[in-house]
Image (tube, rainbow, N blue to C red):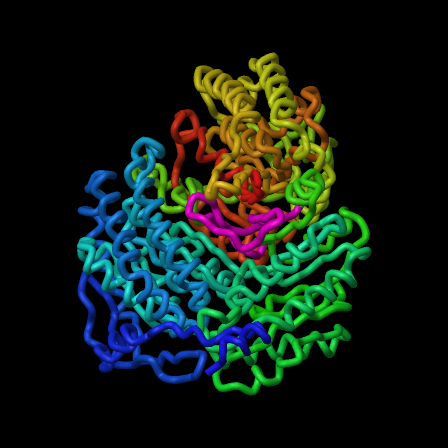
Amino acid sequence: MNQIRDILDTMDYGPAPEDDKDVRAWLTSHKAGFGHFIGGEFTKPGGKTFEVHNPANTAKLADVAIADAGDVDKAVAAANRALKKWQALSGNQRARHLYALARHVQKHARFLAVLETLDNGKTIRETRDIDIPLVARHFYHHAGWAELSDTVFPGYEAAGVCGQIIPWNFPLLMLSWKVAPALAAGCTVVLKSAEHTPLSAIAFAEICAEAGLPAGVFNLVNGAGGTGAALAGHEGIAKLAFTGSTEVGRLLRRQTAGSGKKLSLELGGKSPFIVFDNADIDAAVEGVVDAIWFNQGEVCCAGSRAIVQEGIADRFHDKLRARMEKLRVGDPLDKSMDMGAVVAPVQIREITAKVEAGLAEGATMWQPSWAKTISNADGCFFPPTLFTDVAPSSTLAQEEVFGPVLASMTFRTPGEAVQLANNSRYGLAASVWSQNLDEAFDAARTLKSGIVWINSTNLFDASAGFGGYKESGFGREGGREGMLEYLFPSWQKKAKSLPASDSLPAPTPAPDGSGAGLDRTVKMYVGGKQARPDSGYSYPVSGKNGQHLAEVGLGNRKDIRNAVDAAHKASGWSGMTGHARAQVLYFLAENLELRAAEFAARLTETGASSAAAKREVEASVARIMHYAAWADKYDGAVRAPDKRMLTLALNEPWDVMGISCPDEAPLLGFVSLVMPAIAMGNRVVVTPSPRQPLSACDFYQVLDTSDVPGGVVNIITGDRDTLADTMAKHDDIAALWYFGSHEGTELVERESAGNLKAVWANNGKARDWFDATQGQGEEFLFRAVRIKTIWTPFGV
């Protein structure tokens, strides 16, 4: 036993073990193993099982049943049986249930914290002070959303039965992020726990029964990838939410393509940690500790790439090495430990492989002097590791390690820092350190990340949306935006299927003399100029009586490529103020109205009655004005999750979007999709109605006379699905809207998995473009932006 005098001389920590006897007793009471939680009851453990181990000492904790397809069927059936009654409850009644869950989590907070530490390996300090309080916070917060849902989300209703798949790094916290908004919205849930860490989810199921949650509202199945695949592919699921690796996210995107399921993905990250030369270096060093050694670096938003200004790099690294030497790694139940155990031996092997790759590529590794002692200890421990001399294209700079490994590189100018930070296929989070807030906010606005922390890192709250850009996924968890992931417009319940579209006429000469006279071949519109199709082919467009009207270019992938290049060059549009964009859109509406008779005549030629054509043009003018009005008013939000912190939820454009327009209402459908997209600052590559493209092609003359910069709207004619397939595969298109057939929806959702672009598709369902509820409104604006959450200190 250390003497007080010795402790004062050395300032060493004494042992501070957390008592785990209650959790051990609970595990002993379930020594026969754990089953699933279906329809308000636990199943008896039987059939195939898997072992759960304590990663700190490899000791076995429990046996857990593996759910097969039959178990998933039962869980989904139970959720469907409970759905109608759960949705029928008032918002207040659902709020009471969520409030009860929050209270019961708090009552069992210490038990849950100890259980999570034993199961996952993270320190008791983190589970006790961060994870479990945030779990309760999410249920409290979403109790409020349940109460307010009818008021805040009029015209929306619950998506239905939700399948949810959570990771092993924050088992109970990720459960709360998904279950709380789903229940608040009126959904029921089938959750698959993580195979390494299922125990806290099982304990939560017991809490649901204890708190009186109606049977079937929350259901739990356990297992590995096969169980998750069975859940994701189940026809009884209306919404799928997944947190995990980007590779599995791609598989789920392909698996759910064309199924009509709502999908949200929170995936991997390679988050930059930018340190400017005027930063508080000591604070930034402590920030690194929280960024990469929090939870042993097993965090999707871990600040695993330090990008340090060249003038302070040596001093920063020296201070960081000194701090690393003092970090304490060991028994996670010891309250004085900074780092606990990595979740499993397989993760140790993956971390080791990435470290060896970094060494092979020439990076310089540094570990504390005691590192080998930890590496040779019982249990799954890995020492904090720093790599310098890291090339921006190296494995350590580009690939997620998911362990306590920091890769550091340097920069000279703020512009170079942002370039290095954005040089990643991921875009989940970033951290910026500077005493100059102008500099910090400028970097925050230009970083392609869903979350940016200024002079802070790894902060979370239920009121602040969390989610990524690029291959870090799409959708948000937390805040108002997180609630919308579990809701859909009520009118869609009764939407009818569209009739099948005929194939386009062959691009061959017509021998009937229909092209006699002064011929007009309608060109495409790229970068503000008319352009001939790369293919050299055109196809005929016929009128309502079959008469030949014009030849239209048959676009191909090179035309899409050229249009995307032109859209990227028009980045100045995204930098304009909402007011400036609004003025352009008002001018556009004015010029369209001046040519109303001409556009009405064109619509009459292609099949509309005179009255219908006039109505469509008038509706198109009004639709442009509607989004001109919204251009400077669809703002973000300021939230105060802490008395010294603010979060800014900024609505940012996707930058370049692809849009496939419907056949019905060829002018109004075109306008209804293009206008909200460009009003929010996007540049678009749009394919108009294949059968009736002429009104959209005439529209580019209005664009030319309305001060719309070249490249903001690019129009490519041709076969909708052929061009949509190309846009879905294009890595430089960030979002895609598709309004066509069910088969086309399946195509674009499947092919979008390449860069995991966000897809909004109609799944072959009709939409009344004249209706103010179906053809315009917040749904379009919400889909036209991605929300960036910036955390910033506020006050002292």
Looking at the picture, tell me which residue is in the foreground, 252 or 342.
342
Residue 249 in the image: x percent, y percent?
49, 61
Queried whether the magenta region covers residue 448, the answer comes back as: yes
Q: Main secondary structure of the magenta part?
A: loop
Give the residue drawn at x 25%, y 81%.
47
Q: Residue at x 52, y 34 (%)?
A: 636
Note whether residue 71 is visible: yes
Q: Position of residue 465 (x, y in %)?
A: 47, 46
| Residue that protrudes farthest toward the front in the picture | 5
Position of residue 592 relative to residue 225, above or below, is above
Identify the residue at image location x=64%, y=53%.
731
Q: Can residue 508 be seen here? A: no
x, y (%) of residue 122?
Answer: 46, 69
Q: Which residues are magenta?
A: 447-476
Closer to the camera in the image, 210 or 763: 210
Question: Image quarter for residue 702?
Answer: top right
Q: Please give the name of the residue rendered at 33% of the width and 64% of the height, measured from the top-left corner.
A: 110
Q: Quadrant of the C terminus?
A: top right
